[in-house]
Image (cartoon, rainbow, N blue to C red):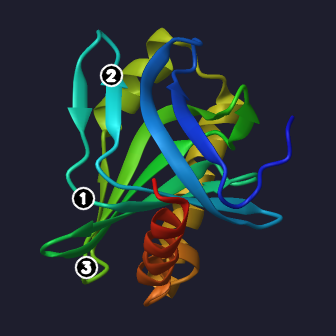
């Protein structure tokens, strides 16, 4: 695996448990590389979904991908405030110029006032059955969802006040300097 560095530009590939590709998105800009996670930014990213449909993201986002946690966090800077969209997903790996991970259906939407809502329970239940998620994966998914909710409640990591905004300032400076 190639060493990731700040200012690298990477694609993101999201897979399902069965190995099928769920979506591929445009390049993201690496903002920070820590021992346990990387932080990337994007704006108006083009996303190709399964089935060949495209969409463009509507707002800038700062994303945290973890090496050991089974989730990733997207801070979305919307006109109405900062929202977070969190995917329960395998730890990431970098391969062939892309961040790759497996999506495990459950998502957590966090609102600007830190209220949150667990999404896609039925999708998780359905895919768990048809893709035969092992019991070990089921335990990890639920344990990591609890850990993620704990981060929200304690305002840690990407949920710390000012954290996403700080990284967005870094993103804007890097984009201007790199002329992306």
* Residue at the outermost left position: 80
**Residue extending furthest toward the bottom:** 161
User: SS at mark 2?
Assistant: strand
How far apart in space, not on screen, are marks 1 and 3 (Cα)? 15 Å
**How dense is the environment of label 2, judged by Cα within 10 Å: few (below 14), some, or many (20 and up)?**
some
Q: Label for residue 112?
A: 3
Number of on-image labels: 3
State left or right for residue 88 relative to residue 57.
right
Q: CA distance from mark 1 to mark 2?
A: 18 Å
Q: Residue at x 44, y 89 (%)?
A: 162
At horizontal 58% and vertical 44% (from top left) the residue drawn is 141
CB-based contact (under 8 Å), mark 1 and mark 2: no
Q: Which mark is residue 49?
A: 2
Taking the image as shown, residue 143 lies to the left or right of residue 114, namely right
For the N terminus, give its image quadrant.
Answer: top right
In this rendering, position of residue 93 left or right of residue 82: right
For image coordinates 73% across by 38% down, the residue present is 93
> What is the crowding at mark 3: few (fewer than 14 residues within 10 Å), some, or many (at least 20)?
few
- Is 120 situated left or right of 104 in this image? left
């Amino acid at each position: 695996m190639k060493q990731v560095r700040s200012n690298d530009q990477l694609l993101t590939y999201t897979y399902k448990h069965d190995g099928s590709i769920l979506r591929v998105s445009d390049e993201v800009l690496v903002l920070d590389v820590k021992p346990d996670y990387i932080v990337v930014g994007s704006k108006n990213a083009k996303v190709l979904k399964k089935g060949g449909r495209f969409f463009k993201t509507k707002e800038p986002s700062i994303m945290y991908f973890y090496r050991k946690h089974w989730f990733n966090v997207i801070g979305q800077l919307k006109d109405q405030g900062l929202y977070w969209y969190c995917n329960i997903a395998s730890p990431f790996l970098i391969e062939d110029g892309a961040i790759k991970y497996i999506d495990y259906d459950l998502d957590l939407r966090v609102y600007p006032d830190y209220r949150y809502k667990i999404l896609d329970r039925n999708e998780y239940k359905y895919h768990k059955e048809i893709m035969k998620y092992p019991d070990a994966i089921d335990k990890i998914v639920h344990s990591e969802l609890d850990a993620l909710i704990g981060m929200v409640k304690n305002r840690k990591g990407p949920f710390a006040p000012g954290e996403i905004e700080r990284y967005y300032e870094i993103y804007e400076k890097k984009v201007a300097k790199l002329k992306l």
